[in-house]
Amino acid sequence: MATPAVLQFRKSFLAPILSLIAVVLAAEIIDHSFNAYIQLIFLYICINIILALSLNLVNGFTGQFSIGHAGFMAVGAYTSAFLSTHPSLFGYEIRFLPASLDFFNYPIYALAGGLTAAAAGYVVGLPSLRLKGDYLAIVTLGFGEIIRVILLNTEAVGGARGLFGISSPADITIAGIEISAFAQSFFWAATAMVLTFIFLWRLINSSHGRGFLSVREDEIAAEAMGINTTNIKVLAFVLSSFFAGIAGSVFAHSTHYLNPSTFSFQKSVDVIIMVVLGGMGSLTGSIVAAIIVSVLPELILRPLQDYTHVDLRMVIYSLLLIIFMIMRPQGIFGTTEISFANLMKSFFHGRKDVIKNS
């Protein structure tokens, strides 16, 4: 029988350790099995999962409606890119680690981008989250557009031309083993994705998470029970912005180029589609929906365009989304979560039913 210490280890550290091993193996398998185009799609999947998970905290679990998520992604992306392209600023060295350890600079850039985005989320969220519904949506939409216009007119970050020459990990050799640039990029992207999921999963299932859910279910009743609903909403907004900034940093160092048009209102809509499609209030639903939204236009509908010589991808993509939301408006999973234990329970419960009926 397992001791309490072993049980605590399994509960706290087993999943992260196994996830890290899976990330390393996946990076090597993808690096040696797919071309550069497919590899880039895998990076986009990680980025979209982080964005969907982070927005679900606000829109799904807290019951608010933000449509400016691309703005926070832009803040994180440009902050990370600026730090990586400016080793010194105002005569001060800002490169965190020497060139020989450049591999470890990227999580620091991502953290800086996330913290900057979180600060922006706090500045926007503190006054605006006293609003509700459509009014809050309009404020967040305005913030996203303000950020895009500021970046468009700021020459220090490239302005309308965009920001070029953003660095990414270079090929390295450790103990005679060559590790490609993609394997390193995917490792950091997938690690950020896994840590985002683990953090939000633990948060939602904690006492703070119950505070988010209480605001979503009945804000007046939550206030009557002594919950500071404004602080809860601001906390959700700041955390959501932080992870959006992390996703922006990963995006910047994956594409090596940033343009303000990338972070338009359409990008925020894409993230909202992932959240609604997967189920508002389901982290695993956001993961599945992000994979579908990333893969469907490129790997499934693009061959159709090559065959017909007519670009109908967005038309078919939109029709599929409309049909699905009519048939299942609560999303793929609704508010339920998928776990290995639940899958096994459903599998064996189904087998018992089959045996009973036979």
Image: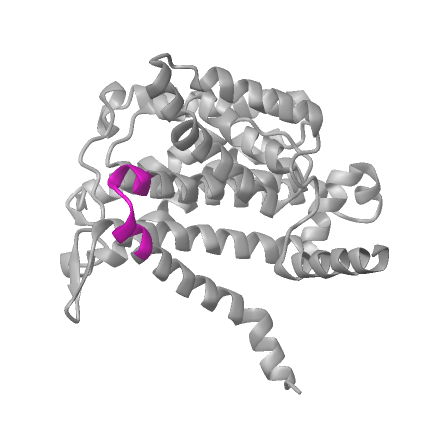
Image quadrant where residue 132 sits: top right
Judging depth in this view, the residue of 322 and 33 nearest the camera is 33
Is 215 placed left or right of 332 in the picture? right
Q: Identify whether 97 is placed above or below 230.
A: below
Q: Quadrant of the C terminus?
A: bottom right
Q: Residue at x 38, y 14 (%)?
A: 311
Q: Residue furthest front?
A: 358
What secondary structure characterizes most of the magenta part?
A: helix
Magenta region: 29-40
Judging depth in this view, the residue of 141 and 25 nearest the camera is 25
Q: Residue at x 52, y 71 (%)?
A: 14
Image quadrant where residue 8 sits: bottom right
**In the image, residue 195 lies in the stretch drawn in magenta:** no
**In the image, residue 32 lies in the stretch drawn in magenta:** yes
Q: Identify whether 177 is placed above or below 5.
A: above
Q: Residue at x 28, y 30 (%)?
A: 258
Judging depth in this view, the residue of 155 and 286 nearest the camera is 286
Q: What x and y, as percent, mark residue 290?
A: 50, 38
Judging depth in this view, the residue of 213 and 224 nearest the camera is 213
Q: What x and y, as percent, mark residue 231?
A: 65, 44
Q: Residue at x 40, y 65 (%)?
A: 21
Q: What x and y, as percent, mark residue 95?
A: 20, 52
Image quadrant where residue 264 sits: top left
Q: Quadrant of the N terminus?
A: bottom right
Is 252 placed left or right of 358 in the picture? left
